Amino acid sequence: MKIVLVVLLPFLILQSCGSSSSEKIEDEQLSSFMLGGIYFFNGYGGTNAVADMMIDAGYTTDKELVGGYKEILEFPFETSQASGIKSVFKSMWNISNKEQLLESINDLKTREHTYKAWDYARIVNNANMGYACGFLTKEEVKKITLEILPLARKKFKNWDDYFTDFNKGRIDWNSEDKDSETYEKIANTITKYDHSIYKILPLNTDKE
């Protein structure tokens, strides 16, 4: 099955709160949405575009950056995009309703597959699309993503391993896909640029 992110995500105007904190920050909800972050980064125009959003907002502290990333990574699709999302679900996944969406999510979650990051990222992406098109509530999306987070933590040491596995899975799915280079570039840079949320919230604090 081929997934296509056809919806351009809105550029959010972020405002700095001007606070600072040196304390350790944890955010399980944001971390769970970060599992699908490569799709959301692609929708916003790539790693550089997302980095510029944080720079333009004036975010410098970890606390400010976490707040900014919550705005763009949690529920990134607009409900106004419902029609387009339903079309994608139907044409690419043969999904027409909530029950079929939940069935496909469970299949991705439980199936034996070499590249599980590929599955986990699609679960989070599809759950968020499901909210935007009216198939799922926000609480249902949160529950789904939070259930995937410990599975990813158990299987992958860190975010680099996770996105390397994702990219291998995508290539295995279709090495000739026109977006392969774009996703590979994001996979290779999403954890490495200045102020990356993937540096602030590691996948496994005890394995880093």
Image (tube, rainbow, N blue to C red):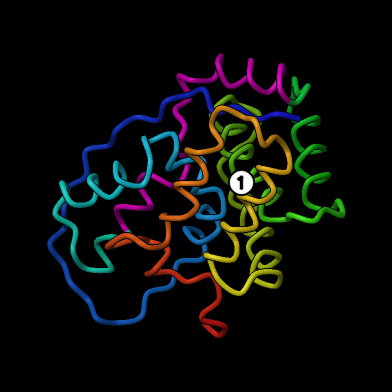
Counting from the top left corner in percent of width and height, residue 2 is at: 70, 29
In this rendering, the count of numbered labels is 1
- The residue to which callout 1 is attached is 124
Circle 1 crowding by C-alpha within 10 Å: few under 14, some 14–19, many from 20: many
Nearest the eye: 160 or 24: 160
**In this rendering, would 62 be left or right of 149?**
left
Counting from the top left corner in percent of width and height, residue 182 is at: 47, 38
Is residue 195 inside the magenta stretch?
Answer: no
Instruction: Tell me: residue 57, above or below residue 201.
Output: above
Counting from the top left corner in percent of width and height, residue 28 is at: 51, 65
**In this rendering, would 20 be left or right of 177?**
left
Is residue 74 inside the magenta stretch?
Answer: yes
Counting from the top left corner in percent of width and height, residue 7 is at: 48, 24
Segment colored magenta: 67-92
Instruction: Tell me: residue 38, above or below residue 60.
Output: above
Label 1 secondary element: helix
Image quarter in which the N terminus is found: top right
Q: Who's the residue at 62% across and 32% down the image?
A: 130
Toward which corner of the image does residue 103 lie, by quadrant? top right
